[in-house]
Image: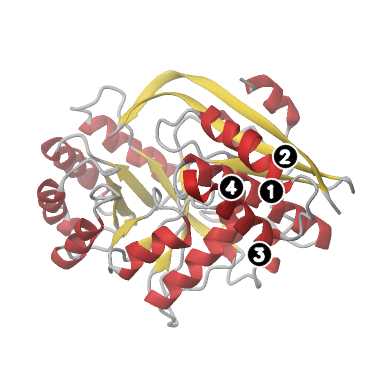
Amino acid sequence: MKITDIRIHVLKSPLAEPFAFSQGWVKQRSATLIEVLTDEGISGWGESFAQGLEPPEIAATVIDKALKPLVVGADPLDIEVLWHRMYNMTRDFGRKGSVISGISAVDIALWDIAGKFYGQPIYKLLGGAFRLQVKPYATGFYRIKGQGEAQRLADEAIRHFEAGFTLMKVKLGYGVDDDLACMNAIGKAIQGKPIKLMVDTNHAYGRAEALRLGRALEAYDLLWYEEPVVPEDIQGYVEMRQKLSMPIAGGENEHTLYGYRELLGAGGLDIAQPDLGSCGGISAGRHIMALAQSHGVQVNPHVWGSAIAQAASLQLIAALPVAHHSLFAQQPVLEYDRSSHPFRQQLITTPIELVNGWVNIPSRPGLGIEVDRTVLDKYRS
């Protein structure tokens, strides 16, 4: 079997109501999706995560101009060989960012092809499933004005709970005082309900403000405090772990085994969050998973992309060992973006949804999804 072509689909959809995270205003949802085609008629789907406010055309150009010539004509089942070929041949201008996102898309598609070729879900090819269901957490609490939205966010928490979510990640980073006002309102709204919270500032603060916020939030018994400082400040992560009681999470903006070697080696994380559409794909996720396991750090993939990225995350989550074995060990959870995103629910014929508070992990071959091509046509840029 040989790779014959890579089709690239850049999708965009303007938002009727733009929203903000700490780094800026999101005015559209976008995605860089690819199909890897073979001479035996088997094709695979992949995705490059458009990180933050990244234009999707960047990864699309990387795939078209730099990666496609490296893999066309190769055997798609040589996944590890092709990963290293792509990484090595782009090292001088890659290593992080959009180049690795491009590699991620190709890699995910190769795993999808392999699963379809062998008639197995990807988690079987990764060594089997530790779990076939996963608890999702609602990611939301974005701002539509900026500050002063505490009551609206408290109401949003109740909507997530009524939709079946008992785990929720609150976006912070809009000024420490405003963050605390919002958390106070949310805390009052969910009092007495079986809800656990995480927070994510998207690296909005320096160490002093990050510590001030973390200390003020210790009473909330958070599942984790995500991206408290910028990804370059590895010693800042170490300081957060040393001085705060809640678990420190991060890594969505880190890439490959090599980037995680520095972050984990320094003792910067309690929870590692590689994004499979950005870190180097499922292959890099597997590398990072093994490294994190050796450091006693739980992996919990970040996912804010389309249904393709969600499906890839589910396959890896199935194959994730717990970091600390016990009868009642803490299990990985699935990030479930609740913001407006047509490429999440509409893109695949069987959307990934909650069933009695859980998400079932697809057991069909490959990623276990079927893409609706009419959605590609509708949102194609």
At x 48%, y 64%, the residue is: 288
Q: Which of the two labelled residues, at mark 3 and mark 4, occupies the earlier sequence position? A: 4
Residue depth check, mark 1 versus mark 3: number of the one nearer the observer = 1
Question: Decide: marks 3, 2 in contact (CB < 8 A)?
Answer: no
Q: Which of the two labelled residues, at mark 2 and mark 1, occupies the earlier sequence position? A: 2
- Mark 1 is on which residue type? Ala
User: Which disc, if any, is residue 35?
Assistant: 2
Q: CA distance from mark 4 to mark 2?
A: 13 Å
Residue depth check, mark 4 versus mark 2: number of the one nearer the observer = 4
Q: Quadrant of residue 10?
A: top right
Q: Which of the two labelled residues, at mark 3 and mark 2, occupies the earlier sequence position? A: 2
Residue highlighted by disc 3: 123
Question: Decide: marks 1, 3 in contact (CB < 8 A)?
Answer: no
Q: CA distance from mark 3 to mark 2?
A: 20 Å
267 is higher (above) or lower (below) than 275: below
- Mark 3 is on which residue type? Tyr
- Is 295 or 188 nearer to us in this picture? 295
At x 52%, y 47%, the residue is: 100
Residue highlighted by disc 1: 109
118 is higher (above) or lower (below) than 56: below
- Is 222 or 266 nearer to us in this picture? 266
* In the image: residue 30, left or right of residue 223: right
User: Which disc, if any, is residue 170?
Assistant: none
- Mark 2 is on which residue type? Glu
Q: Quadrant of residue 184?
A: top left
User: Badge 3: few (under 14), some or many (20 or more) residues near its Cα, within 10 Å?
Assistant: many
Q: Quadrant of residue 196?
A: bottom left
At x 33%, y 41%, the residue is: 157
Q: CA distance from mark 3 to mark 4?
A: 20 Å
Question: Decide: marks 4, 2 in contact (CB < 8 A)?
Answer: no
* In the image: residue 371, left or right of residue 12: right
